[in-house]
Amino acid sequence: MARVPTAVMNLFHRVPRLPQALTRRRSTRPPAAPAAAIGPRPRPWARALGLVAVVLLGAWLGLLVVGNVRVPVGPMNTTMTLRPSFTGGTKINVSPLGALQLDSHIAPVRLDVNVDQLDPERSRALVDHPERLSGLQDEVTQDIARGTADLAVRSCVAVVTGAATLGLLVYRRPRRALAAGGLALGLLAASGGTAYATWNPDSVLEPKFSGLLSSAPSLVGDARSIVTEFNVYQQELARLVTNVTKLYDATSTLPVYQPDPTTIRVLHVSDIHLNPASWKIIASLVEQYRVDVIVDSGDTMDHGTAAENGFLDPVENLGAPYVWVRGNHDSLVTQRYLEGMKNVHVLDDGRATTVAGLRFAGMGDPQFTPDRTQRTGAEQSQELAGARLASSMRDQRRAGTPVDVAVIHEPSAAREVDGTVPLVLSGHIHREESEVMRYGTRLRVEGSTGGSGLRAIEGKYPDPIETSILYFDRDTRRLQAWDSIELGGLGLTTAEVSRHLPEENQPGADTSPSPSGSPSGSPSGAPSGSTPSAASATPSRPRP
C-alpha cells in the first residue's frame, strides 16, 4: 500500500509539464494574424509600375548628380550631359549667345553640351599660330569621340548607382535593389540603341538658334556653303566650334557674315499691322544678313486710311528695295501712297518687275475688309485673283521673261498659281507655313512681322514677330534655303533662328534644277525630292 501514494505523487509531478510541452509544440507554428490585419496583396502590375517609377527616378537623380563629363574640345572647356527627354536631340548651350538645337536623334534621352569657357592658353596658341586652325577639325572630332565614350561609361554608372540606391532605400532588399539597377542599365542601353538607330547626321543642316539674334548668321554660315560643304556631321560640328572660338576670343573681332556673291538674299515680311517696331527689326535684318530685296505680302496697315500713310515713311530708308502687294487691310489710298515713294515696287494686276536679279509678279488682295468681316463670295474672289495672276505669269513665260517669285496676300489665292512659278509668297493667316503643292510650286506663308499689331494683346499670350530670310541661287534663281526668324511678342525678349533646306538641296539629292514654271496640270515642274509638308490647305482662323 505504501507504493500507491508514491505512484500518485509521480503522476502529479508530470501533469504540470504537459502544458509546457503543448506550448512548445504550438510555438513552432506561425501565429495567425488577426482578421482585421489581413489586407489585399498588391497586384503584379502595380508592383511592376512601382519598380519602374523607382528605376526612372533613381536613374534621373543619378544623371543629375554624377552623370556629366568635363571635356576639352579644341580650345574650349565643355560639359557633356545626358538628360531625360521626350523628343531627344542635341542641345549645345553657348553662353552668353544662347543655344543651338539639332534634331540629331529620336530617343528618350537628350545630349546637352555646355560650352563653359575658352581656355586662355589654347586659344592664345591659335591666335599666335593661325595655321593650326587647319588641323582643328581633326582635333575637335577626336575630343568629341573621347568625351562621348567617357559620357557613356559615366552615364551607365550613374543610372545603375542611382536606381540601385533608391531601390535599396524603398524596398530595403538587396535583390530588389540589384533588379532596379539592372533594369536601369537595360533602359539606358535601349535608349542608346534607339538613338543610334535614328541618328541623323544631316541635322546640322537645319539648326535652330535661340538667344542673341546677331550671332546666328556667323554661326550658321552661308547658305551656299551649307548646300555644298555640309556633308560630314563631324566636320561641320568642328566648323561651329571654330566659329565660336573666334567669337569668344577677346583679341579677335567678330567673324563677318560675308555674303556669297552668287546668293540673292530676300527678306520676306507680312502683316505688319501698324507696328512701328517692325521697321527697326527689318532695318537690322537688312544690315545683318546683307539683304538684297524686301518682299512685303500685305496688310502693312490696319484700316488703310490716309491718316495712317505717315507710318510708311521709313520704307524708303530700310536699306534695300521694297516689293509690296496690297492686303485686305490695305486700301487703294495706301497703294497710291507707296507708288509715289522711291525704292518701292508695287505689284498689282499680275504686273511683273525685276529687282536684284529676281523677277517678281503680284496681285493685290481683291477684298478690302479693315473691320475683319467675311464678305459673301470672298473665297471665289480670291480664287479669281489667283487665276488672273497665273494667266499673267503664263503670258510672261511665253514672252521669254518667266517669273521667279509670285507674291499675293492670301494663301487661298496663292494656290491658284500652282505649276506656273517655282515659288509663291503670301501671308494673311499670321503663322508660318511651307509646302510644295501638287504641281511643284512651293508655297511659303509668312507669319506676322508686326506680331499682329495691337490685336497682340487680345489673347492670353502675345503673338510672336515672324519673318524669313530666303536664299536664291543667282544663276538658277531657285530657292536654296531659308532662315525662319521668330522674336518674342509684346513684352518678351526671346529670339530664335532656324535653318531649313528644300528636299532637293539635301545631301545626296538630285540637284539638277527642274523646269521653271511648268504648265498647270503637269507635274513635271515638281522639284526633285520635294514632298508636301503637313500644312493645312485652308486658313483655319477667322479673317485677320
Image (cartoon, grey):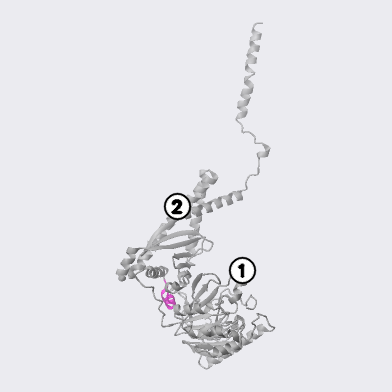
Q: Secondary structure at mark 2?
A: helix
Type of amino acid under label 1: Lys
Name the residue that disc number 2 marks.
157
How many marks are shown on the rendered structure?
Answer: 2
Label 1 sits on residue: 460
Majority secondary structure in the magenta region: helix
> What is the x, y in percent for residue 406?
54, 85
Mark 2: amino acid: Val
Q: Which residues are magenta?
A: 221-231
Q: Please state which of residues 370 and 395 is positioned toward the viewer in this rendering.
A: 370
The x, y position of residue 489, in whole percent, is 55, 72
Asked if residue 347 can be seen in this view, the reply is no
On the image, the x and y values in percent for residue 466 come to: 54, 75
Q: Determine if the magenta segment contains residue 228.
A: yes
Viewed as shown, does residue 11 lie left or right of 134? right
Confirm whether the magenta stretch covers residue 539.
no
Q: Residues within 10 Å of mark 2 (few under 14, many from 20)?
A: some
Is residue 505 found left or right of 7 in the rendered image? left
Q: Position of residue 181 (x, y in %)?
A: 50, 50
- With respect to residue 405, does 499 lie above or below? above
| Front-most of residues 403 and 329 | 329
* Rendered residue at 39%/76% (across/down): 256
Point 68% across, 38% down: residue: 35
Q: Which of labels 1 and 2 is toward the front?
A: 1
